[in-house]
Every structure is written in C-alpha cells, then in structure tokens.
Amino acid sequence: MWYALYNLSLLLATAVLLPYLAIRALVTGRELHRWRERLGFPAPLPRERPVLWIHGVSVGEILAAGPLIEALPRSSPSPFHLVLSTVTETGQQIARRRYGSKATIVRFPFDWRFSVTRAFERLHPSLVLIMETEIWPNFLRECVRRGIPVVLASGRLSDRSFRRYRRFRPFMARVLKNFRLLLMQSEEDARRMRELGAPAERVRVVGNVKWDARPSDEEVAIVEELAHQLGLPRERSLIVAGSTAAGEEAVILRAFELLRARCADLRSIRLLIAPRRPERFDAVEAWLHASGWRVIRRTRASDREKAERAEVILLDTLGELAAVYRLAHVAVIGGSFYVSLAHNVIEPLARGACVIVGPRYSDPHFPAYAACVWRISAPPGPDALARALADAMERLLREEDLRARFHEAARVFLAQHRGTTERILSHLAPILVEAMARRP
C-alpha cells in the first residue's frame, strides 16, 4: 500500500509539472539530453567489468565523494568501471570536470519504476554507494530486487528531513531496510535513522568524509592564476564570502563598507563573493554595479589594470571556491544569515582561512568544531548583522594572536577527525568482494 501511495503521489506531481517542463525543454533545447538520461536512457556500458555506481545529488556530495573515488580502486579486489550520477546541472559540471577521465557521468533517473529499471539495464551496477542523504524508494527497491547491495556513505539526516520522514515512519522503515549498510556521520544521525526504522545492526557511525578532503594539485594552479590575473599579493589579501544566498550579499557588502570606512589601513583588503547558484551571477553583478562598487568577474579578469582596481570580485565559476580560500584571511560562509543551509566550513578551515558564520548556521556536527569558527550573534535586522560581521572581520584581520588561536583549533580538529574514508572502506570490504564477483 505504501509504495502504491508513493507512486500515486509521483504521478500527480508529474501531471502538474510536466507541461512546464516540456515547454522549457522545447524552448531551450538544452533539456532534451537531460530528459533522456533522467527517463532511464543513459548510454549503455559494455559488460566487460563490474560497475560501481556512486550517486551524489549536487556539487557538495560529489566533492565529498572525492576521497572515496581516489581510494576505492586501491581497495577493490578487482578493476571496476565507475559511474557517477547527480541530479543538479552544477553537480554534472563538477563531476565531468573533476572525474570525466575516470568515470562515466550520468544524470540520476527519475524515481519512477520504468525509468529506474531502464537505467539499471543500461548501467548494470554491481554496487551502489549513495552519498549523504538521497533516499529514493523505487530505486532502492529495484536494487534489492536485482540483488545489488546499496550503501549510504557518510550519511546524514537533518532535523528538518527527520521531522518530515517521521510522519511516514511505517513506509520509511520498509525503505531503509533496502540499504545493506547506513554509514552515518554522527551518533545523532545514526539515532535518527534507527528511530525511522532502519535495522540497528546495519547502522554504523563513521564520521564525515569531507573531513578527509585535502587540497589538490589543481588548486595550486588556480591560486597562481587568480593571484596573477587579479593583481593579488602572495600573502592572504581577501575576504571571501562563499556560497551566498539571496539577500546575504547586501549584509556582507554593508559590513565590508563599514570595515573600510573605519579602518583606513585595511582598505587594500578586497572582497570576493561567490553566489551559491550560477543563475544569480548576472543579477548579483548588476546589483553590485548599481551600488557603486568597482566590480570584476573572475571570467573577465584578463584586463589586469581593471582587475587591480576592482574592490569586489565576483567568482562566476564552478569548482574554484575551495582554491580561493587559500587566498583568504577571512571566509564568511553563506547560507547562515537568513537561511540555514549548513554549507561546508571544512574547505576554508583546511586551507588556513579564519571562518565566520551567521546566526542561522546549522549543522549537527557544529559542537565538534565550534572552537574553530566565529559564529555571529546579533539581533535580527540587516544593520545589526552587518555591524556584528564588520566587528568580527576587523578583529580577525587585526589580531594575529586571535587568528593563531583559530588556526590551532582547526588543526587539532582536523587531525582528530580525519580517517572517515578508511572507516568506510573497512565496512565496505566484504561487500566489495561480493560485488566485484558478480557477473556484469
């Protein structure tokens, strides 16, 4: 009954959205290829070796999968073909850029039984790893029907998702039994999964695989290029506002304005803004120009003279934000001032930036690294937030001892919490042996 109700709800949602999606596909022409893959028609793979399928919904999950992608070939008892899937287009772009030479990159099928079945018939996976939080009932059920083990790796379950899933606990209990293992980030994540009905013996705590991510050689080249194009000195000379959401740029720019107005000796510090969504790049640039700032986009920084005069840099590329944190004295994390999106703070911490988050920052792991991060506390309202943010920026830029304290806390935290990749691999070892023995 539960699966029938779930599929009926999918059908109704499709009926409502289909006209809009069809018109957009016809108008843009860019949607047609995406639709083919999401309907279950990726290019078929040759049946010459086992297939390991890793799924991450978007950029964050694909980047988090990096340590596993690098380590799995060394841990597998035999060679395999790697498939990476995403839902979002930004995730597709990053997956192709980072792993296009190592993996087949596809779009995850819609969770209709016919599209899931077709995708399996073309990709014939032997093992499926799902990163963080992606629970698709028909997909998981088809995995079990075909005898394909499926593992949730570095899983997490936010309080919001937990409350939503708890309304359908009888159904969720049936769905979660389709996972061979649920390898969770924290004890709280594990408790929530067990409370939803996941078999307790299949739930383990391994930590957050993002804590294992290390700066890549590619980042060095990006930093060198940016420093040259933008006329940045080799030492840290930026405040970086990463993954900002709508409305947050105004608070951050106002704080930057206050900082420059009261600290003449800090006016050489520049601000780099990286909006979370690419579709906002143009609007943010237009707003910055209208506000009177000298602005340059990363992709238009070939004019060295104009770039050196710019007060604000707009990072309008994908996959470069982590590298940019190497140039930052201070990193301000978006999705923490007006919305609660729990963006990645590990990337700037691991690259030596002092991290500031807003009052809405939410992450179940925050108590573990609270000593590494400056969390703003301010009354509601953009002016109060901007003043509190300007105060935090000024102290971190001026007080070397304060920066050193944050850096040491970050170093200790990262040293204590790395190793998630190896813990995941140790749990996967018998499942990998089983999966690699399957005939493709």
Image (cartoon, grey):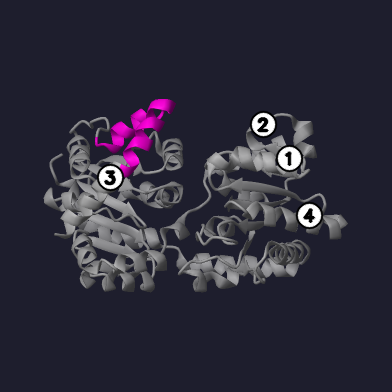
- Which is more toward the observer, 375 or 2? 2
The residue wearing badge 1 is 289
Return the disc, 4 or 1, that comes first in the chain's sequence.
4
Image marks 2 and 3: residues in contact by CB distance under 8 Å = no
Magenta part of the protein: which range?
Answer: 16-40
Image marks 1 and 3: residues in contact by CB distance under 8 Å = no
Percent across and percent down for residue 72 are: 32, 49
Q: Residue at x 57, y 42 (%)?
A: 280
Mark 1 or mark 2: which is in front? Answer: 1
The residue wearing badge 3 is 53
Q: Residue at x 74, y 65 (%)?
A: 387
Return the disc, 1 or 3, that comes first in the chain's sequence.
3
The residue wearing badge 2 is 300
Image marks 4 and 1: residues in contact by CB distance under 8 Å = no
The quadrant of the rendering that contains the C terminus is: top left
Q: Is residue 417 above or below residue 255?
A: below
